[in-house]
Image: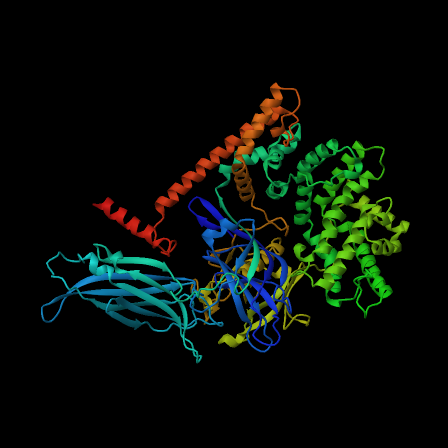
C-alpha cells in the first residue's frame, strides 16, 4: 500500500531473514532450557511470529518474512519470548532498530545484542500540545505569568494487555517545583481526544520592567513541561506507562506560544544498561526498501527503452541485458525486470531472446542453463510469480500430510535411531516419492500458460543448437521445472508459501531426501545411481530404475513445452488461498455489546470464503466468491477497533478485525483479487458501519442505501500478477543509479573494443559486449534517462525539505528533530522581521 505525497507515491517494504539466537539467558530453575520463539513488530504491533524452538538456549529459526508496510512506523522490533504453558509467555529480550538506521544493516547478516524489555521503554505514538504564556494581574495588583498547557489528543498509543484506557499527567518541572495535574481517563481507545487545559504559575524573580511576554532566557531554561501518558489499569500492579515527553519552555520564544506534535519517548530510567550479550543475541538480515514513485510520464523514456530489449540485435546490447551486466548479483536485476515485463505482457519474447543468446554461447549441452545467469534468474522469478498457485494445488496437500504425519523416513544407517527399522523407513520414503512424482507428472494440464510458452522457447533453442543430442530438448526444460521449481519447493516449503514455517528437523530431513530423489528423476541422467555421493541414496534409487519413470517425465515435459496450448480450463478442485484466526461481528443477530464479536477460523479458496468455530470444524457460514461485491477497510470509529475491514454481500456486510495492519491488508488484497471479475461488483460503499438505525458515515437511515464513497481502484483478476509497472521502473532506475560507475566503465569497454581489435583488456573482460557500437548507443540512452530521473528526485527532496514543518502531525518533534525545530523557528522569526 502506497502513502500518497505531493506528486508521488511512497512504498515501504521489508524482507527479513531471522537466522538464529545464541547464548540466551538460561531459565532460572533446574531445567535451564527454554522454548523460544521470535516475533517481528512494527513499533508495538506484532506482524509475524516464528515457530517455537523447544529446549534450546541457541534456537535456530531459519525463517523468512516479507511484507509491504501499510503505515508509518518508528522502530522495527524483534522480541524473543519464552513459551509458558501455565502463564503468560515471558519476554527475554528485544532488538529495536530505528527506521532511519535500517539502511546501516541493509542486506547484511548482523548479530544484534538483546536488550531488556521493560514497560518504561515500550513506547509508541505521539501527542499534540499547545503552550501559551500569559501575563496576569492578580487581585493585589501584582503581575505574574501563567502557563496554559492544552493537551489536545494522542495517536497510535500502544495497546496493553488487549486494552488502552489512557490519561495524561502534566507537570511543570523546575529547580524547586514539580506540580502534577491529570486529564480524565478516555476508555477503550488508543487515539484519545482530551482537549483539556491546565494552568501553571510561572514565578519571575526579576523586575517586571521588560515588555509583555518577554521572558528572560535564564528563567525559561530552568523550567520544563513534562507530559506522561498512562494506561489506567484495574490490576494490583498499578497503571502502565505509555510514553512521555519533556518540553523545555524556551520553545515559547518571544511570541509566548507553542503548538506542536511530539513523539512519545521512553522514561530516562526505562532502558537498563546491560553488558553486551548478557541476554543473548539475535542474527538478522534486514532489507528495507522505500520506493518514491512519480507519475507514469516521468518513467516513459526508461520504460520504453527496457521494453524494447527483446527486439534489440544482439540482445546483449539491450537495456535489460546491460542491467544484468552491471548489477553485482543477477538476482538484483532479474526481480524488477520480470515484474516489469510481466506487467506489460512481454515476458515471453524477452526471456526467449536472452535464453537463445545464452544457448548459442553454451558449448556443452550438459551444462545448459546450469549457471546463475540473467536468463536462469529471470525464469526462476517468472516461475515463482506465475506458478505459485500451480505449486499450491499440486504440492500443498501432500506436503501438509508429510508435515503432520511425522513418519520416520531416515535411510542413512548411520543416522538411524534404535527404535527405527531401515526397511520400514525406505518403504515410507518410497511411498512419499511415488505420490509426489505422480502428482507432478500428471499436473501438466494446470501448468500456467506463460511458463509453457517459455519452456517451448527453451526447448526449441536447445534442440536447434544441439541437434545431435536428442535429450537436450528435455534437459533444457527439466533443469528449470524440476531443479529450480519443484525440488526447492519440496525442500523449503515455507519459502514457497506451502507451509507457514520451516519444518522441524525430522520432517526437514524427510523433505530433503524426497527433493533429492525427485530432482534426479527429473534430470533424465544416463547413469542415475552414479549421481549420488551417498551409497544409501544409490541403493534407494534402485526402486525407481524403471523405464516408466523416464517415460512419465518425458511425457510431462512434452506436455508443458508444446506449442498451440489449449484454452486454460477452470480448476474444479478448490485451491486454499489463505486461512487464519480473525474476529468477526455477528451478522445482524445481536447489534449491541462486545458479545457479538467472536474469534473464528477464516478460510478462503477460489470458490468460497468461510468461517468456522475452529480449524478443521464444519463451516458456520459460507460466502460464495460470486457474492462478494466489494472488500474495503472499515473506519476505526465504527467500533473503536483497529485493523477492521468489511466483506460486502448483497444482503449485508460482514465486519472483520484482523490481528494486525499487515494481515488486514493481505486479506483485503487477496479477497479483492479473487472477486475482481464478479459482474455485480459495487462502485460505491459505506466506509463506516450501520449502527443504531443509520450509517455513521453519511447518516442515511436506510440500511440498503447506496454507498457514499467510491470503492478503491480495481485490481487485476490474476492473483499472482498484481504489479505496479512504475514502481518496477523506479527500482530499475535505482539500480542503474547505484551502478553508474559500471555503466561508465562499460562505455569505456565499448570504446576500447571498437578501436582495438586485440586481446581484451582485463578490466573490461567481465562484460558481455557482442556489438560495441549498439551497446554504446544503449548505454548513452540509459545514462541520459537515469540522469533526468536523478534531477527530478533531487528537486523533489529539495521541495520536501523546504515544505517540511517540524512539529506538524506528519513530522512530530522527536529526540533528533528538536534542534531542527528550534532552527526552523529561528529562521522563521528572522524572516518575518
Rendered location of residue 301, percent (x, y): 53, 33
Expressed as whole percent of the image width and height from the top left, the position of residue 232 reads: 40, 75
Image-based side of 620 in relation to 111, left or right:
right
x and y, in percent, of residue 676 in the image: 60, 54
* Colouring rule applied to residues: rainbow
Left or right of 311 on screen, residue 693: left
Q: Nearest the camera: 437 or 523? A: 523
Lateral position of residue 346 relative to residue 274, left or right: right
Residue furthest to the bottom in view is 236
In front of the other: 288 or 414:
414
Q: Residue at x 48, y 42 (%)?
A: 294
Q: Is residue 723 above or below residue 609?
A: above
User: Foreground residue, 662 or 49?
Assistant: 49
Residue 138, quarter of the rendered image: bottom left
Total numbered labels placed on residues in the image: 0
The image quadrant that residue 39 belongs to is bottom right
**Quadrant, the C terminus:** top left
For the view shown, which residue lies furthest in the right direction? 546
Q: Is residue 653 visible?
A: no
Q: Is 138 situated above or below 358?
A: below
Q: Position of residue 465 (x, y in %)?
A: 79, 32
Q: Is residue 24 visible?
A: yes
Q: Residue at x 32, y 71 (%)?
A: 183
Is 168 situated left or right of 660 in this image? Answer: left
Identify the residue at horizontal 69%, vertical 63% (top origin).
Answer: 504
In which image quadrant can residue 51 be found? bottom right
Amino acid at each position: 500500500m502506497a502513502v500518497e505525497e505531493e506528486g508521488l507515491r511512497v512504498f515501504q517494504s521489508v524482507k527479513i531473514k531471522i537466522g538464529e539466537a545464541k547464548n540466551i539467558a538460561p531459565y532460572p530453575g533446574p531445567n535451564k532450557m527454554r522454548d523460544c520463539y521470535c516475533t517481528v513488530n512494527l513499533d508495538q504491533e506484532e506482524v509475524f511470529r516464528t515457530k517455537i524452538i523447544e529446549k534450546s538456549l541457541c534456537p535456530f529459526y531459519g525463517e523468512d518474512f516479507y511484507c509491504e508496510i501499510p503505515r508509518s512506523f518508528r522502530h522495527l522490533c524483534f522480541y524473543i519470548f519464552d513459551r509458558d504453558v501455565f502463564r503468560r509467555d515471558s519476554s527475554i529480550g528485544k532488538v529495536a532498530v530505528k527506521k532511519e538506521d535500517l539502511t546501516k544493516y541493509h542486506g547484511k547478516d548482523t548479530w544484534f545484542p538483546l536488550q531488556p524489555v521493560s514497560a518504561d521503554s515500550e513506547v509508541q505514538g505521539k501527542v499534540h500540545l499547545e503552550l501559551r504564556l500569559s501575563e496576569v494581574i492578580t487581585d493585589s495588583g501584582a503581575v505574574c505569568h501563567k502557563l496554559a498547557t492544552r493537551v489536545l489528543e494522542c495517536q497510535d498509543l500502544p495497546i496493553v494487555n488487549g486494552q488502552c484506557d489512557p490519561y495524561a499527567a502534566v507537570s511543570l518541572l523546575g529547580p524547586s517545583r514539580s506540580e502534577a495535574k491529570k486529564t480524565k481517563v478516555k476508555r477503550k481507545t488508543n487515539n484519545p481526544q482530551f482537549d483539556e487545559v491546565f494552568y501553571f504559575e510561572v514565578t519571575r524573580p526579576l523586575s517586571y520592567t521588560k515588555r509583555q511576554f518577554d521572558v528572560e532566557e535564564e528563567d525559561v531554561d530552568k523550567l520544563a513541561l513534562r507530559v506522561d501518558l498512562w494506561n489506567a489499569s484495574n490490576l494490583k500492579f498499578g497503571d502502565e506507562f505509555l510514553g512521555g515527553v519533556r518540553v523545555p519552555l524556551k520553545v515559547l520564544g518571544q511570541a509566548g506560544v507553542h503548538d506542536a506534535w511530539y513523539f512519545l519517548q521512553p522514561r530516562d530510567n526505562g532502558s537498563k544498561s546491560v553488558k553486551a550479550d548478557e541476554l543473548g543475541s539475535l542474527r538478522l538480515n534486514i532489507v528495507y526498501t522505500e520506493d518514491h514513485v512519480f507519475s507514469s510520464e516521468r518513467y516513459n523514456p526508461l520504460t520504453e527503452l527496457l521494453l524494447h530489449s527483446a527486439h534489440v540485435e544482439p540482445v546483449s546490447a539491450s537495456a535489460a541485458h546491460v542491467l544484468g551486466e552491471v548489477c553485482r548479483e543477477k538476482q538484483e536485476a532479474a526481480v524488477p525486470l520480470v515484474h516489469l515485463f510481466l506487467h506489460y505482457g512481454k515476458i515471453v519474447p524477452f526471456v526467449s531472446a536472452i535464453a537463445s543468446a545464452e544457448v548459442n554461447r553454451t558449448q556443452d549441452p550438459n551444462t545448459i542453463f546450469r549457471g546463475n545467469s540473467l536468463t536462469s534468474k529471470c525464469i526462476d522469478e517468472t516461475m515463482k510469480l506465475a506458478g505459485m498457485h500451480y505449486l499450491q494445488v499440486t504440492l500443498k496437500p501432500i506436503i501438509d500430510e508429510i508435515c503432520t504425519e511425522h513418519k520416520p523416513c531416515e535411510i542413512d544407517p548411520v543416522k538411524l535411531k534404535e527404535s527405527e527399522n531401515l526397511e520400514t523407513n525406505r518403504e515410507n520414503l518410497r511411498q512419499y516419492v511415488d505420490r509426489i512424482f505422480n502428482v507432478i507428472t500428471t499436473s501438466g494440464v494446470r501448468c500456467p500458460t506463460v511458463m509453457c510458452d517459455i519452456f517451448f522457447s527453451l526447448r526449441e533453442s536447445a534442440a536447434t543448437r544441439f541437434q545431435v543430442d536428442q535429450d537436450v530438448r528435455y534437459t533444457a526444460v527439466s533443469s528449470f521445472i524440476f531443479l529450480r521449481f519443484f525440488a526447492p519447493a519440496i525442500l523449503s516449503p515455507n519459502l514457497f508459501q506451502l507451509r507457514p514455517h520451516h519444518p522441524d528437523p525430522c520432517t526437514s530431513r524427510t523433505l530433503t531426501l524426497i527433493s533429492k530423489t525427485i530432482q534426479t528423476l527429473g534430470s533424465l541422467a544416463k547413469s542415475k545411481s552414479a549421481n549420488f555421493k551417498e551409497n544409501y541414496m544409490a541403493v534407494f534409487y534402485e526402486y525407481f530404475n524403471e523405464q516408466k519413470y523416464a517415460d512419465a517425465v518425458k511425457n510431462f515435459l512434452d506436455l508443458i513445452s508444446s506449442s498451440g496450448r489449449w484454452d486454460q480450463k477452470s480448476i474444479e478442485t478448490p485451491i486454499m488461498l489463505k486461512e487464519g484466526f480473525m474476529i468477526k461481528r455477528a451478522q445482524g443477530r445481536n447489534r449491541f455489546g462486545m458479545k457479538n464479536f467472536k474469534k473464528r477460523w477464516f478460510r478462503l479458496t477460489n470458490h468460497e470464503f468461510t468461517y468456522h468455530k475452529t480449524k478443521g470444524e464444519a463451516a458456520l457460514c459460507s460466502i460464495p466468491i460470486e457474492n462478494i461485491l466489494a472488500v474495503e477497510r472499515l473506519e476505526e470509529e465504527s467500533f473503536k477497533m483497529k485493523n477492521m475491514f468489511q466483506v460486502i454481500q448483497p444482503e449485508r456486510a460482514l465486519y472483520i478485525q484482523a490481528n494486525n495492519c499487515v494481515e488486514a491488508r493481505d486479506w483485503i488484497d487477496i479477497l479483492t483479487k479473487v472477486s475482481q471479475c464478479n459482474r455485480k461488483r459495487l462502485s460505491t460503499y459505506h466506509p463506516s458501519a450501520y449502527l443504531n438505525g443509520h450509517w455513521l458515515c453519511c447518516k442515511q437511515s436506510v440500511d440498503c442505501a447506496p454507498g457514499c464513497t467510491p470503492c478503491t481502484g480495481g485490481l487485476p483478476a490474476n492473483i499472482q500478477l498484481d504489479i505496479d509497472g512504475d514502481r518496477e521502473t523506479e527500482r530499475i532506475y535505482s539500480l542503474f543509479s547505484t551502478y553508474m560507475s559500471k555503466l561508465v566503465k562499460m562505455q569505456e569497454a565499448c570504446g576500447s573494443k571498437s578501436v582495438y581489435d586485440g586481446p581484451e583488456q582485463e578490466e573490461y573482460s567481465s562484460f558481455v559486449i557482442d556489438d560495441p557500437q549498439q551497446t554504446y548507443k544503449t548505454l548513452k540512452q540509459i545514462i541520459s534517462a537515469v540522469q533526468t530521473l536523478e534531477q527530478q528526485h533531487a528537486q523533489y527532496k529539495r521541495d520536501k525539505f523546504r515544505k517540511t514543518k517540524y512539529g506538524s502531525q506528519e513530522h512530530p518533534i522527536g529526540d533528533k528533530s528538536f534542534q531542527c525545530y528550534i532552527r526552523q523557528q529561528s529562521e522563521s522569526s528572522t524572516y518575518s522581521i
